[in-house]
């Protein structure tokens, strides 16, 4: 590992390790979105990834490196859903067991999928219990390796393959916008951007109610917040990580926030105009562009759509009132 872990060489190694395991997800464009923003937008669609989100990249890379040395009784992780699903599937593919610590209010679709991939689920109350402490305790009690959802160099390297593919498929970009929860995806993508397109400005986007990343970048140190109340359940993190923050502080130009209403507007656009389903967390980066939180006119802009795991009934309720706004002529 380099001083800022992971290095681009780690991302390249992860990409080779993931070959034939993860999908090389498509990069979609939209004439309507370009007209709306005055920019040329490239959407990296990790909502089409196995398990429905980018998380399999980091989970598989981390477990593959762990099991390559042998001697593990299995893995454990804490997650609101997408990392849990990814760990469960990666563990099954690599022939080991997975125990997942999930909040009691995790979306049922994510709990069902996690169990469907073979993972054992233990619930906790996100408002009164510390998921990290529970994860560490279970790891010690059962002899499992703990793989956190973002603050792990191998996880970060796996997530960075998302941007590597985007640059390879879309070419040079002026801006790259990435959803931000704990920072695994953003930090990995920032490392890839520095190596492949040094002139590209990387922007993180998090929910308005969960602005710990923005506060941390402004303050120059990790800021902890209470568990945020936001539709973006994958970004309800309370702080950045010891590995992710130094990368973000060094390589990320800015962090902006969007409201839940702006997330729903973006989700409705994707459903109405591009015929794809994007979950609230997955729509963070796109919402920032559509809501003009970042100036993009005249620029080539990469946007990571990080996932599409949302209950269909809940999705329908969320976008119903916003669908009319998105139903514009292509």
Image (cartoon, rainbow, N blue to C red):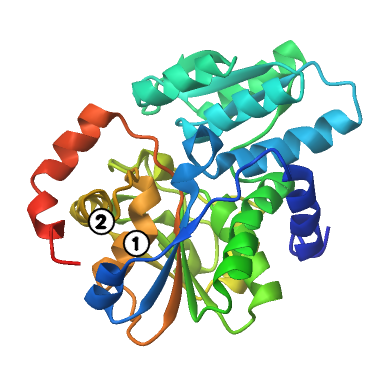
Residue 96 is situated, as x and y percent measured from the top left of the image, at 75, 18
In the picture of the structure, the residue carrying the numbered disc 2 is 266
The one nearer the camera, 29 or 210, is 29
Q: Earlier in the sequence, mark 2 or mark 1?
A: 2
Q: Tell whether label 1 touches label 2 (CB within 8 Å).
A: yes
SS of the residue under disc 1: helix
Residue at 63% across / 78% down in the picture?
Answer: 197
Give the vertical position of 126 relative to 97 (above or below): below
Residue at 36% across / 87% down in the picture?
Answer: 298
- The answer to whether residue 115 is left or right of residue 156 is left
Residue 101: which disc?
none
- The answer to whether residue 243 is left or right of residue 181 is right
- The answer to whether residue 128 is left or right of residue 96 is left
Residue at 39% across / 66% down in the picture?
Answer: 29
Give the vertical position of 301 relative to 128 (above or below): below
User: Callout 1: few (<14), some (14-19), or many (20+) C-alpha neighbours within 10 Å?
Assistant: many
The one nearer the camera, 106 or 222, is 106
Question: Split into 4 quadrants, where in the image is the C terminus?
Answer: bottom left
Give the vertical position of 129 relative to 152 (above or below): above
Residue 292 is situated, as x and y percent measured from the top left of the image, at 26, 74
User: Callout 2: few (<14), some (14-19), or many (20+) C-alpha neighbours within 10 Å?
Assistant: many
Residue 144 is situated, as x and y percent measured from the top left of the image, at 74, 20
**Number of marks drawn:** 2
SS of the residue under disc 2: helix
In the picture of the structure, the residue carrying the numbered disc 1 is 286
Residue at 55% across / 36% down in the picture?
Answer: 50
Spatial CA distance of label 2 from label 1 is 7 Å
């Amino acid at each position: 590992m380099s001083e800022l872990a992971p290095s681009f060489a780690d991302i390249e190694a992860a990409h080779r390790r993931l070959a034939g395991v993860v999908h090389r997800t498509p990069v979609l464009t939209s004439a309507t979105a370009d007209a709306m923003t005055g920019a040329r937008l490239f959407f990296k669609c990790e909502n089409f990834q196995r398990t429905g989100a980018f998380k399999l990249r980091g989970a598989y890379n981390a477990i593959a490196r762990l099991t390559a040395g042998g001697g593990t009784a299995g893995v454990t992780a804490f997650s609101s859903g997408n990392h849990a699903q990814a760990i469960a599937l990666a563990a099954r593919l690599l022939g080991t067991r997975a125990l997942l610590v999930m909040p009691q209010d995790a979306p049922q679709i994510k709990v069902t999928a996690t169990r469907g991939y073979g993972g054992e689920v233990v619930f906790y109350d996100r408002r009164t219990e510390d998921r990290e402490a529970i994860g560490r305790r279970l790891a010690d009690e059962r002899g499992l390796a703990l793989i956190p959802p973002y603050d792990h160099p191998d996880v970060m390297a796996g997530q960075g393959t998302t941007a590597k593919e985007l640059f390879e498929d879309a070419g040079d970009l002026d801006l790259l916008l990435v959803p931000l929860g704990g920072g695994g995806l953003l930090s990995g993508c920032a490392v890839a951007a520095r190596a492949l397109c040094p002139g590209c400005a990387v922007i993180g986007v998090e929910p308005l109610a969960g602005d710990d990343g923005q506060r941390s970048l402004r303050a120059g140190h990790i800021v902890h917040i209470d568990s945020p109340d936001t539709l973006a359940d994958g970004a309800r993190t309370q702080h950045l990580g010891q590995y992710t923050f130094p990368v973000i502080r060094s390589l990320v130009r800015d962090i902006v926030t969007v409201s839940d209403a702006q997330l729903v507007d973006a989700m409705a656009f994707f459903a109405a105009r591009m015929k794809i389903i994007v979950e609230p967390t997955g729509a963070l980066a796109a919402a920032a562009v559509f809501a003009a939180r970042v100036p993009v006119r005249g620029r080539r802009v990469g946007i990571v759509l990080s996932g599409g795991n949302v209950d269909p009934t809940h999705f329908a309720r969320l976008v119903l009132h916003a669908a009319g706004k998105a139903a514009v002529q292509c």
